[in-house]
Image: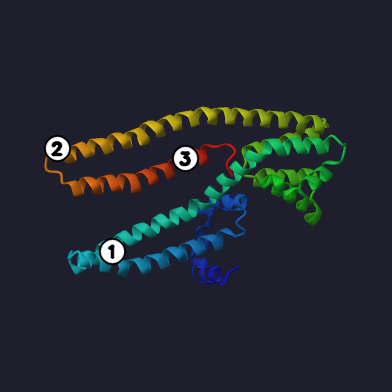
Amino acid sequence: MSSYTKTAMRHLGKFLEPNLHLFSDLKDDLKKSRMRLSIEEYLSTSLLTCIILFVAEVPLFSFIFSLLKLGILFSIFTAITVSLGISILFFLIFLNYPKFIIGDKAKSIERTLPFAGIYLSAIASSGLPLYKVFEIFSKFDEYGDVSSEAKSIVNDMSAFGLSIKDSLKKAVDRTPSKELRELFWSILSSLESGGNLSTLLDQKSKTFLGDYKRKLEEFSKSLEIFLEVYLTALVLGTIFFTILTSLMSGIGGGITQTSIISIQFALIFILIPLISFGFIVLIRSASPGEG
C-alpha cells in the first residue's frame, strides 16, 4: 500500500466504512479487474483525489472568472459550482474505471481464446490430468490474460489447496470474459458428468474459432463502409470545400482572403488530422484482432 493510499485510508476510511454496502458492484469489479486494492482503499484514494482536485480548482477558476469582470461573489460562486461538478465527474469516472479495465481484459481474452482453446485441446488429448493441463498451459505467456487465468487456477490449487472443481468455480466468478466463463462451466460439467475433456475442448475451440472468423468477416465489411465514408466525406469533401472557398475569395462577398486562408489552414492542418485520428481509433476498437 502506497503512502498516498495510507493517508486516504487514515482520514477517509472511517467515513466510508458504514456506506460500503452501496458499492457492492464496485467490489466485484475490483476483483475482476485485479487492481489489487480493497474497496476501502480504492474509494478512499478516489475521494481524496477528488477533494484535492476541488481545493485546487476553486482558486484557479475564481481567478479566471474574475478576469472576465463577473464580480467577486459571482466568480467565487461559479468557481465552486464548476469545481464541484468537475470533482463529481471525476469521482464517477473513478467508480467506472474498473469496468473499463474489465472490458479491455474481456476483449483480450476473447481475442486469444480461439487459439488458446486449440492448444488446451492438444494438451488434454495427451491424457494428462486437468491440473497438469492448466499447469503446462499457464507457462505460455503468448496467450495473455487466458494464461493469467490458468496461472490463477494453478495457484489456487497449489497454494491454497483447493480442488480443481473449486478452483474452476472461483475462476468463473473472477474472469471478466463471458466466453471463458462458459468454457470453465463446460469443463466443470464435464468433470461432474465424467465426459471426455479432450473432445469437449476440441469442440469448444472449433466454436471459438468459427466465431472469430465470423467477427473478421463482419469487420471486413465494416471496413469497406468506413473507407467509403472516409474517402467521400473527408478527401472529396475537403477538395470541394477548398475549391469553393477559393472561388468565394475571388468573387468577394465580404469575405477577406485572410479569412479564407485561415479557414482552409484550420481545415487541412487541424480538422482533417483530428477526423483521421478518430477514424483510426474507431477502426482499431472495432477490429477483433486489435490488442
Mark sitting earlier along the chain (3/2): 2
- In this view, the residue in front, 120 or 191, is 120
Quadrant for the C terminus, please: top right
Q: Quick check: 240 left or right of 213? A: left
Q: Secondary structure at mark 3?
A: helix
Crowding around mark 3 (Cα neighbors within 10 Å: few <14, some 14 to 19, many 20+) is few
- In the foreground, 236 or 184: 236
For residue 32, above or below residue 253: below
Identify residue for label 1: 79
Q: Quadrant of residue 61?
A: bottom left
Whichever of callouts 3 and 1 sits on the residue coming sooner in the sequence is: 1
Instruction: Tell me the CA gap for discs 3 and 2.
Output: 40 Å
Q: Secondary structure at mark 1?
A: helix
Q: Is residue 184 at all visible to an observer of this figure?
A: no
Image location of residue 235, percent across then percent down: 37, 35
- Callout 2, which amino acid? Ile
The residue to which callout 2 is attached is 251
- Residue occupying the far right of the picture: 127
Q: What residue do we see at 33% from left, 45% from top?
A: 268
Residue 16: x, y in percent? 50, 62
Horizontal arrangement in the rendering, residue 74 relative to residue 174 (left or right):
left
Marks 3/1: CA–CA distance: 35 Å
- Farthest residue to the front: give it: 250
Residue placed under numbered mark 3 in the picture? 282
Query: Where does residue 54 sit, x and y in percent of width and height?
Result: 37, 65
At a point 82% along the width and 45% down the height, the residue shown is 131
Residue 68 seen in the current view: yes
On the rendered structure, is 238 left or right of 35?
left
Q: Earlier in the sequence, mark 2 or mark 1?
A: 1
